[in-house]
Amino acid sequence: MSVNALFKKIVLESPVGIVILGKDGIILFSNEVFRSLIPNIKEVTGYEFKMIIHPDDREKYIKDFDELIGGSRASYYEDYRYENYNNKDEWFRFRVSSVQED
């Protein structure tokens, strides 16, 4: 099995949600586990990720993401809320890393 095929298998079969964002914060990819956490959004690819974050946590998320994209942070851990399909607050624990294309 090639490294690319192995990586794809790991991401798709991971027991944790994985999402890949562009530098503009738009979702480029998500695995099934991540999509199952936010069933009220039918198509997450192309969706602006900050709109998933609870409005009260959005400013903090934007600051953290901007620092990551700006290069002042290589990665971070943070908890953010979102509203689930029952309009109840749920929490995500994020491990966010910047991966630059060669």
Image (cartoon, rainbow, N blue to C red):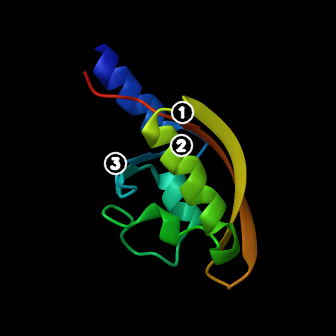
Which residue is located at x 61 percent, y 43 percent? Answer: 16
Element type at marker 3? Answer: loop
Residue that mark 2 sits on: 67
Q: Is residue 64 left or right of residue 41?
A: right
| First of labels 3, 2 by sequence position | 3
Alpha carbons under labels 3 and 2: distance apart: 14 Å
Element type at marker 1? Answer: loop
Residue that mark 3 sits on: 22
Report crowding for label 1: few under 14, some 14 to 19, many 20 or more residues within 10 A (C-alpha). Answer: few
Q: Residue furthest left?
A: 102
Q: Position of residue 77 (x, y in %)?
A: 69, 40
Residue 20, visible in the rendered structure: yes
Alpha carbons under labels 1 and 2: distance apart: 5 Å
Q: Is residue 9 left or right of residue 57?
A: left
Kindly indicate whether the residue at mark 2 contacts the one at mark 3 (C-beta within 8 angstroms): no
Q: Amino acid at mark 3?
A: Gly
Residue that mark 1 sits on: 72
- Foreground: disc 3 or disc 1: 1
Report crowding for label 2: few under 14, some 14 to 19, many 20 or more residues within 10 A (C-alpha). Answer: some
Q: Nearer the viewer, residue 69 or 44?
A: 69
Q: Amino acid at mark 1?
A: Ser
Q: Amino acid at mark 2?
A: Glu
Kindly indicate whether the residue at mark 2 contacts the one at mark 1 (C-beta within 8 angstroms): yes
Give the quadrant of residue 20. top left
